[in-house]
Amino acid sequence: MPYNTSLNNSAVLAADAGNFRNIALDVFRYQHENNALYREYCNALHVNAARINLLPQIPFLPVSFFKTHKVITGNNGTAELVFESSGTTGDQASRHYVTDAAIYRSSLLQGFKEFYEDPAECVILALLPSYLERQNASLVYMAKTLMEQSGHADNGFYISEWAKLSEVLVRLEKSKQKVLLLGVTFALLDFADAFPMPLSNTIVMETGGMKGRREELTRAEVHAILKKKWQLNEVHSEYGMTELLSQAYATAGGIFKCTSTMRVLARDINDPLEVLEHGTGCLNIIDLANINSCSFIATEDIGDIASDGSFEVLGRMDHSALRGCSLMTV
């Protein structure tokens, strides 16, 4: 079956529960035809692209390919953005070559609004030490994009200026201004220890990542600490990675839900070709916003996917190198 020749950014961003499958299959056929690396991978698995008609049948490219290859679909090999993972000592970093930055910004803002208000309604504060200290971190670009959309004078990045951040939060709380405090986990814990305070108008969103900076804690333990220190009802979470352009968000209890351009499936830990739409296994991610790279990624995260498509991250495969922004085990 030929793919939809009118496939473009607008078509991908129009995905919803009713048409996601058809759009994903169109993207698969498009990428099979226009991404030589992905086509070679499918050929190595003896996949007949014409016979793929269900999402679990689609081959998922191992995320490690982003460390060793330039993963691009189409003839335009010029990257407007290059997102790069932090990697670990002795480990090669992943690179995601984004040839069309517009679809990233559009999918990010569209997905954010599905879960939250327009960024223009709130102040964006980002506590991202280690990410700000290196170039090409996708998380920093995400925060910058939200800040640009917000346009608030108090938007800002913080590394270790905790006293200044505390002053800003206290002032914004007094004025009842809505705030999103986006932070890497170890930094949020350190800041909360140093500056406990009631935060009634602030959403605290952790992005994962302990990086050996503190004792490893489960997500539930981290959230319990932050809720106690800041008198919060819930702590929110974001799931994303260098190799993806879409995100998933958890507004309570560490249960993630995908934005409209993303879906997760579970592959059997012992048989990577056995893929189910729900259950426990390694996470395979469909990211339609990755139309210009590869939309079908086999990650090294282990999760549990419910029948409604929501999921919980349980940890990582034992043999996997720890990613700089990897999420915690629960």
Image: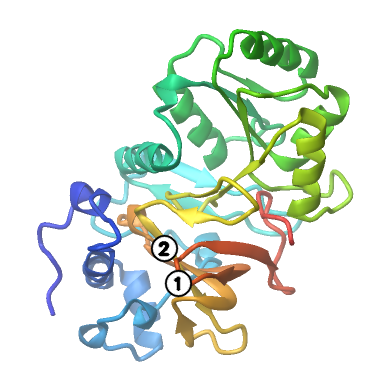
Q: Is residue 117 left or right of residue 9?
A: right
The residue carrying pointer 1 sits among few (fewer than 14), some (14 to 19) or many (20 or more) residues within 10 Å by Cα, namely: many
Give the residue at x 73% y 42%. 185
Inspect this view and state whether residue 137 appears: no
Identify the residue at horizontal 58%, vertical 13% (top origin).
176
> Can you say which quadrant of the picture contains the N terminus?
bottom left
| Residue under the image location 68 percent in, 50 percent down | 324
- Dot in front, 1 or 2: 2
Task: Give me the residue at 59% from left, 8% from top.
Answer: 175
Quadrant in the rendering for residue 121: top left
Is residue 1 in view? yes
* Occupied quadrant, residue 45: bottom left
Q: Quadrant of residue 88?
A: bottom right
Image quarter in which the C terminus is found: bottom right
Q: Secondary structure at mark 2?
A: strand
Residue type for callout 1? Leu
The image shows residue 277 at horizontal and vertical percentages of 44, 76
Tell me the kind of residue under disc 2.
Arg
CB under 8 Å between discs 1 and 2: no
Using the image, determine if residue 167 lies above or below residue 7. above
As drawn, is 206 to the left or to the right of 9?
right
- Regarding mark 1 in the picture, which secondary structure is present there? strand
Q: Is residue 149 above or below residue 275?
A: above
List the residue tagged with mark 2: 263
Determine which residue is flagged by label 1. Answer: 61
